[in-house]
């Protein structure tokens, strides 16, 4: 009698824990994807560099912690600022030259730049996996039977805060309005006096900033290596397709969904297949609902 | 003789190898409403796009108060005081009516004067005030045109160029918009109006030009153009 009464609660606690883990991961995924989505939506550029930007952000956090003792939560500012500058220069100096060209042209350019950046990082930092070992980790706590991994949780909350800040910048600030205006109608925006190429550079910079910030937060969770770049890029891509392209709400919904799917998938068929499930789902979604969960049409 | 307020001289323009405008001369005096009429494909839209900097001219000059604009960037032409309401309104979807209007003031420092102008536009078009927080894409055609015109006067232009004021709109909406244009004009803004609806254009304008296959073929006060046999035959459908 007793085991039968306990079983259901034990299962529901297990599921709740897995959902929690998935959402924590998902919040970080949203932060990775939101910059990628912004750049794709506004510039119509599929930024292959995005994954390497995330990795670069992680390295900045790693070295800032190892050499300067700066906590990765604070390095978000450092990594975000550095990546914004890098993104701005790359767009203003290189991608702006071909930004009006078909998607394939810009794709090849960012692919080439990614090869340079990624291999540059391998040369500079080696491909060895590094981890940030915090001297004073927050550890974890148990609330109502659920284990809360505090470092991860704070990282996820910071990621959400950054995403919300980005949202308000886009909606409330003059630059943000100009970014949205350029996305909706480049020519009409130019007639309003918007310097479209400068807005492109700022947008690409913001995308890189979000990648760098996400990388900084992820340095606490994932081992750091240039080899992870392609995985982060894949995550950004899936989140965008899941949530619908170009909207911040889409990136959040897509990120959380991917985190949850991966967590439950790992439970059902083993942790090594978590990403496999995500990709299978991506293919199914592309076939049956290519507009994503949020249902908005993509860039036009 | 003093130089006219706004002057286009020998303007040649087009797209790539295709020449659309062949030496267009046109003037707008201070405080005037001037219309440019002509059939489809005559080059009216190209003329406005060239003046506002969306298309780079191949030759010729465009001057406002003596300042050369030909070849400048859109933002510099807007700063010089020439605003362009594009054909089809081209509002920013997903952005609210208020944000669309604020985009018109993008080059201005955000201070009290911007809020005052916003207030003025909302007073001129009460429908926009009612829908200030609504997505601009949900407006009716007439309201969209109000928003587009309001957006462009948020830049405080000296010359307002409007491409197809009446296209696709109900007669009543066109009438309202026409009254607003006269009001804007009386407040000191000169207007260059491009129209396919010749009667509407000539009712509003003091003078008119007829553009045909990239060349100005006639220029006269509105009353004269209305009576001109060539205009009546070609554009009004009466002989």
Image (spheres, coloured by chain):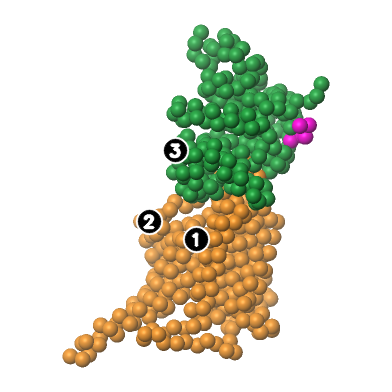
Chain colours: A orange, B green
Point out the image quarter for the N terminus of chain A: bottom left
Point out residue B106 in the picture as x, y percentages from the top left corner. Answer: 64, 48
Dot 3 alpha-carbon crowd within 10 angstroms: few under 14, some 14 to 19, many 20 or more: few
Q: Is residue A139 above or below residue B211?
A: below
Q: Residue at x 51, y 49 (%)?
A: B95
- A252 vs B111, left or right, is left
Same chain for mark 1 and mark 3? The answer is no
Residue B4: tell me if it is visible: yes
Residue pictured at 64% horizontal, 42% vertical: B155
Q: Position of residue B33 (x, y in %)?
A: 63, 25
Question: A226 and A250: which one is in front?
Answer: A250
Q: Which image quadrant is residue B186 in?
A: top right
Numbered label tally: 3
Q: CA distance from mark 1 to mark 3?
A: 28 Å
Q: Residues within 10 Å of mark 1 (few under 14, many from 20)?
A: many
1 or 2: tag closer to the N-terminus:
1
Image coordinates for residue A75, horizontal then vertical, percent: 63, 76
- Asked if disc 2 and disc 3 are in contact, CB closer than 8 Å, the reply is no
Q: Secondary structure at mark 3?
A: loop
C-alpha separation, residue under disc 1 versus residue under disc 2: 19 Å
The residues colored magenta run B65-69
Q: Which mark is residue B140?
A: 3
Q: Mark 1 highlights which residue?
A: A248
User: Which residue is identified by label 2?
Assistant: A289
Q: Residue furthest right?
A: B1
């Amino acid at each position: 009698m007793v085991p039968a009464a306990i079983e259901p609660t034990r299962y529901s606690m297990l599921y709740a824990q897995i959902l929690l883990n998935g959402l924590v991961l998902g919040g970080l995924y949203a932060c990775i994807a939101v910059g990628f989505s912004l750049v794709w939506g506004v510039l119509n550029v599929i930024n292959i560099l995005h994954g390497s930007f995330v990795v670069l952000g992680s390295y900045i956090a790693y070295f800032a912690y190892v050499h300067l003792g700066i906590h990765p939560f604070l390095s978000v500012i450092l990594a975000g600022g550095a990546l914004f500058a890098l993104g701005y220069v790359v767009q203003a100096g290189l991608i702006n030259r071909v930004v009006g060209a078909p998607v394939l042209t810009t794709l090849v350019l960012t692919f080439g730049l990614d090869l340079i950046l990624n291999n540059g990082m391998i040369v500079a930092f080696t491909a060895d996996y590094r981890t940030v070992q915090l001297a004073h980790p927050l550890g974890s706590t148990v609330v109502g039977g659920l284990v809360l991994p505090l470092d991860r949780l704070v990282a996820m909350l910071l990621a959400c805060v950054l995403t919300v800040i980005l949202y308000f910048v886009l909606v409330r600030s003059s630059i943000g309005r100009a970014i949205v205006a350029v996305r909706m109608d480049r020519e009409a925006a130019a007639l309003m006096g918007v310097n479209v190429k400068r807005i492109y550079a700022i947008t690409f910079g913001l995308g890189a900033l979000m990648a760098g910030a996400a990388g900084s937060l992820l340095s606490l969770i994932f081992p750091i290596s240039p080899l992870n770049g392609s995985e982060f890029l894949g995550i950004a891509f899936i989140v965008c397709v899941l949530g619908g392209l170009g909207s911040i709400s889409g990136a959040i919904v897509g990120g959380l969904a991917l985190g949850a799917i991966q967590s439950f998938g790992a439970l059902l068929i083993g942790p090594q297949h978590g990403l496999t499930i995500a990709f299978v789902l991506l293919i199914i979604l592309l076939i049956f609902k290519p507009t994503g969960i949020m249902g908005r049409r993509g860039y036009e | 003789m003093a130089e006219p307020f706004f002057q286009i001289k020998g303007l040649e323009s087009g797209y790539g190898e295709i020449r659309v405008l062949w030496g267009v001369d046109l003037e707008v005096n201070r405080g005037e409403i001037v219309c440019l009429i002509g059939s489809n494909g005559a080059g009216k839209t190209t003329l406005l796009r060239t003046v506002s900097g969306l298309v780079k001219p191949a030759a010729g000059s465009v001057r406002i108060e003596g300042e050369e604009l030909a070849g400048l960037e859109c933002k510099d032409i807007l700063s010089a005081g020439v605003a362009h309401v594009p054909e089809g309104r081209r509002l920013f979807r997903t952005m609210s009516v208020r944000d669309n209007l604020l985009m018109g003031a993008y080059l201005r420092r955000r201070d009290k004067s911007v809020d005052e102008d916003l207030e003025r536009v909302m007073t001129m078009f009460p429908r926009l005030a009612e829908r200030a927080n609504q997505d601009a894409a949900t407006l009716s055609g007439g309201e969209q045109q109000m928003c587009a015109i309001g957006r462009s006067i948020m830049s405080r232009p000296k010359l307002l160029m409007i491409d197809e004021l009446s296209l696709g709109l109900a007669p009543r909406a066109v009438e309202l918009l026409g009254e607003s244009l006269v009001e804007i004009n009386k407040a000191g803004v000169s207007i260059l109006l491009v129209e396919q609806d010749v009667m509407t254009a000539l009712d509003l304008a003091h003078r008119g030009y007829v553009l045909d296959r990239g060349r100005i073929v006639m220029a006269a006060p509105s009353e004269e153009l209305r009576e001109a046999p060539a205009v009546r035959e070609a554009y009004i459908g009466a002989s």
